[in-house]
Amino acid sequence: MLIGIKRLKIFVALACLTAVLSGCSTLSTMIKPTAKSNEPPVEEPAPYFVEMHPIIGKAKLFQGAISQPTTVQNALQQSGAFKMTNSMTVDLHRQLPNGGVLKLPVEFKKNRQVKYEQDYALHPHDRIVVQAKSNSPLDKLVDQVFGEL
């Protein structure tokens, strides 16, 4: 009888061990990772554009990304617009929900700093248009006589 109980205990122990080991392997194949995640989708940074129109030559287009709060001053520096010319006019073109375009003039100081009240925060798809101006003595005379054209 003692041998029968020992055999029974060994059999039960082996059966439990087999069940645990085989249960773990089949359990891992039954659990499949779900394709959907609870994390929000990663959004691409929204673009903005800087059009640079030199006095001579072709216009250049710079495309930047708004990955953090960006202003007109930051965009002009990143695009290299200040390197293009010493004198320029700058306008911010913003798309309106009704399909129109809002044109905001941007003035800057002699040290190439955009005036604080016109250093607008950029919105997705804003377009900054930079037009180089000539600074020749003849241009200055015409500006004095007729005003800026």
Image: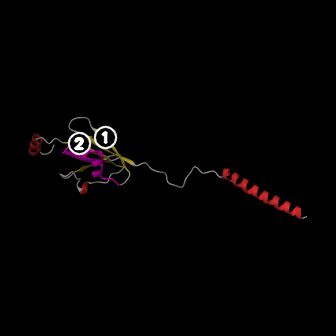
x then y, percent, for residue 134 = 16, 41
Question: Which residue lies at the image location 18% right of the left edge and 42% below the top edge?
Answer: 133
Question: Which residue lies at the image location 72% right of the left edge and 55% below the top edge?
Answer: 21
In the displayed orientation, state which residue is furthest to the bottom: 2
27 left or right, relative to 15: left
Q: Amino acid at mark 1?
A: Leu
Q: Which residues are drawn in magenta?
A: 69-93
Q: Residues within 10 Å of mark 1 (few under 14, many from 20)?
A: some
- The question of residue 82 being in magenta is answered with yes
Question: Which residue lies at the image location 26% right of the left edge and 35% below the top edge?
Answer: 58
Regarding residue 37, the answer to whether it shows in the image is yes
149 left or right, relative to 81: left
6 left or right, relative to 99: right
Quarter of the picture containing the N terminus is bottom right
Q: Amino acid at mark 2?
A: Met
The residue wearing badge 2 is: 84
**Residue 133 marker:** none
Regarding residue 102, the answer to whether it shows in the image is no
The one nearer the camera, 130 or 27, is 27
Q: Residues within 10 Å of mark 2 (few under 14, many from 20)?
A: some
